[in-house]
Amino acid sequence: MTTNGMLIAISSPYRKAGLMYAKHKQYFNTDSDDTLVIQGSTRTFNKTLDENAIKAQQEADPEAGKAEWDAQFRSDLVGFLDDALIDAAVDYNRPLELPPQPGRFYKCFVDVSGGAIAGDSYTLSIVHREDGKFVVDLVRGRSGPFEPAQVTEEYAALCKEYRIGAINGDYYAAQWMVSVWRQCGMSYIKSTLPTSQIYIETLPLFTRGLVVLPNEPILLRELRLLERTPTRMGKDLVTHPRGCHDDRANSVCGALYGISNYLGYDLHSGWLSTEDNPNAEEERKARDQLYRNQLAQKIFQYSGGQLCLASILILPALRCVDAALVRMTSRSISTVAIISSSTSRRLSSRAIS
């Protein structure tokens, strides 16, 4: 450790954001008493490298080549979420995690991981809607090494505290992870959208100020680092920078998309209403009926075909249902219980063996 020592920072340019870009913009080509910024290509500082090898890599990826070999900041990368949008969404006065509340409907999304050292984290996020906003109640993540089945058991127990009976998860999750959640008595439903599309679909929630985030440092960092790039297919790709992770960001945005989609929020025009959309009520009923059908099919599937679907009791007002608690055996379901917060009644249906 030195006193009044010199700090030297060396890096290849990347996105036009962050500390390196800010220092370059402020001090490059300017006179400063305490800061000197030097910018030069690989050819300038190291003439021993093979010129043909440099040209080959630049031709393979021109934009990356400009940064790696010519020391130019990339023009094809932009931040997905402005810092101002993220800062506006953070509630600095709340606890890091909010406990479950009676009568409140929760949604959960997980980004699963195999538990390898230095690999992705196994993350979980739980959200709810309150006063017109989508509140992230908690974000948890486990870094490797760990045993995936053990972490799944912990997460399943946590979800049951929030009366969550079905888990939405990553589009690319392996089939074995579905089985692990099933062993914990939970349904694992793969997302129909890849991670990049989930990010794009949830952007309107941030721009309209409808998201409430905890002050969770890793989550906020991942959100700030997300990059949006155009592709040759004409669609934008949103992902994390090379060497970084977005596990918490993925689980949070997945949960936000899940609950907004389930509650009928049109991410492109706003809340559906009978005044703005004459078919809104019919569309809501269709969504509810589809959910009931999918739930019945899942229960029938997990029962090994031993459960009579006609014996399942489904509440007509499914939006009031907090959870569907299903106790399963290896061959059949012993009890199907649906708890309604509006009536506080427990309805059960015995399996027909």
Image (cartoon, rainbow, N blue to C red):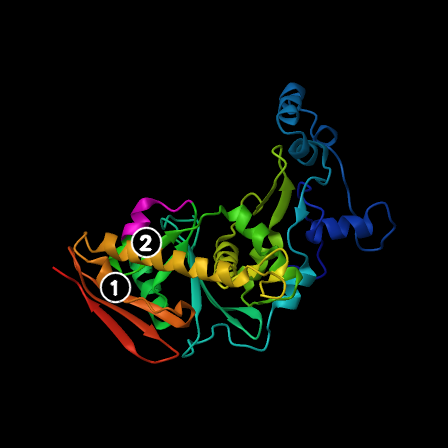
Picture coordinates of residue 88, whole percent (x, y): 66, 67
Residue neighbourhood size for the residue with mark 1, other residues' Cα within 10 Å, grouped as few (<14), some (14–19), many (≥20): many
| Residue, disc 2 | 148
Give me the disc on residue 312.
1
Residue at the (53%, 51%) spot, across then down: 198
Report the residue that reaches farthest toward the right.
31
Q: Eyeballing the image, is 186 above or below 76?
A: below
Picture coordinates of residue 215, whole percent (x, y): 56, 69
Residue 331 left/right relative to 84: left
Residue at the (38%, 77%) spot, across then down: 341
Give me the disc on residue 68.
none
Tell me the kind of residue under disc 1. Answer: Ile
Badge nearest the viewer, 2 or 1: 1
Give the mark, 2 or 1, whose residue is nearer the N terminus. 2
Q: Are marks 2 and 1 in contact (CB under 8 Å)?
A: no
Residue at the (67%, 29%) spot, across then down: 62
The dominant secondary structure in magenta is helix
Q: Which residues are magenta?
A: 172-179
Picture coordinates of residue 97, whole percent (x, y): 47, 72
Residue 141 left/right relative to 8: left
Q: How many marks?
A: 2
How far is disc 2 from disc 1 in space, using C-alphas?
Answer: 33 Å
Q: Secondary structure at mark 2?
A: helix
Report the residue that reaches farthest toward the left.
353
Decide which of 69, 345 is in the foreground and name it: 345
151 part of magenta stretch: no
| Residue 82 appears in the picture as rendered | yes
Residue neighbourhood size for the residue with mark 2, other residues' Cα within 10 Å, grouped as few (<14), some (14–19), many (≥20): some
Residue at the (55%, 59%) spot, across then down: 279
